């Protein structure tokens, strides 16, 4: 599903008057979630799941083209854990 499809569904289900209002709500939601994750906070959406930032350790990898061993630096990643209701609905 694309952003346009999500915004259209949001407009219909939430009762927004225009697509612009629905898109503003969509953008605001993801801006808020992104800002919370950037601050190191976890985001929990009851019935859907949760997002949190995890640290990945530095590790050795292999360049698939040359086979040469390389060092992959430590990084941060976002981890999503589905909620019970989402798991059961699938």
Image (tube, rainbow, N blue to C red):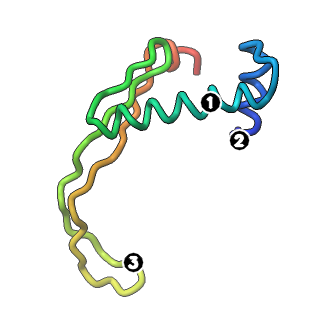
Give x and y (percent) for residue 13.
75, 14
According to the image, label 3 marks what residue? 64
Residue visible at 38% across and 30% down?
51
Whole-percent x, y for residue 7 in the image:
72, 31
**Looking at the picture, how far across and down is residue 50, in whole percent?**
39, 25
Residue marked by disc 1: 26
Q: Nearer the viewer, residue 38 or 58?
A: 38
Q: Earlier in the sequence, mark 3 or mark 1?
A: 1
**The C terminus - image quarter:** top right
The answer to whether mark 2 and mark 3 are in CB contact below 8 A is no
Q: Nearer the viewer, residue 86 or 77?
A: 77
Q: Earlier in the sequence, mark 2 or mark 3?
A: 2
Numbered badge on residue 2:
2
Q: Quadrant of residue 17?
A: top right
Residue 19 placed where, x, y %?
A: 79, 29
Q: Earlier in the sequence, mark 2 or mark 1?
A: 2
Q: Residues within 10 Å of mark 2 (few under 14, many from 20)?
A: few
């Amino acid at each position: 599903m694309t952003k346009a499809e999500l915004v259209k569904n949001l407009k219909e289900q939430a009762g927004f008057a225009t697509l612009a209002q629905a898109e503003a709500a969509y953008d605001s939601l993801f801006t808020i979630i992104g800002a919370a994750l950037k601050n190191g906070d976890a985001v929990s959406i009851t019935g859907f799941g949760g997002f949190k930032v995890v640290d990945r350790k530095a590790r050795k990898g292999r360049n698939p083209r040359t086979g040469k061993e390389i060092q992959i630096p430590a990084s941060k990643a976002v981890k999503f854990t589905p909620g019970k209701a989402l798991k059961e609905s699938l």
